[in-house]
Image: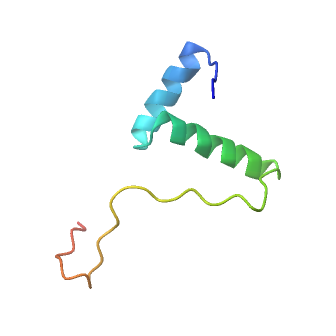
Amino acid sequence: MLLRLDPGVHEALVRWAGDELRSVNAQIELLLRRALAEAGRLPGDVRPVPRRGRPRRTEDDGRPDQRG
């Protein structure tokens, strides 16, 4: 999908996505979902965004807990 953005808007999205450790695509999807939900227009059959990345460690998985 082609999305035309003002270069300043794109750069702001790049910085924001980087701050939150997301791709620009994921950041745009997050913002669109929030806006749709706030407007009451998010369809009920939309699946939640899958969690990506390494799963969090738990204390009972046999490995040391890395929280700190």
- Name which quarter of the figure residue 66 lies in: bottom left
Residue 25 placement, left or right of 33 = left
Most extreme residue toward the left, as rendered? Answer: 64
Most extreme residue toward the front, as rendered? Answer: 1
Most extreme residue toward the bottom, as rendered? Answer: 60
Q: At which x and y percent is residue 40?
A: 83, 53
Check the picture and name the quadrant holding the C terminus: bottom left
Residue 51 placement, left or right of 9 = left
- Between 38 and 22, the residue placed more toward the observer is 22
Check the picture and name the quadrant holding the N terminus: top right
Q: At which x and y percent is residue 56?
A: 33, 68
Q: At which x and y percent is residue 64?
A: 16, 76
Most extreme residue toward the right, as rendered? Answer: 40
Q: Residue at x 25, y 68 (%)?
A: 67
Rendering colour mode:
rainbow
- Name which quarter of the figure residue 55 lies in: bottom left
Q: Residue at x 64, y 24 (%)?
A: 3
Above/below status of 30 relative to 51: above
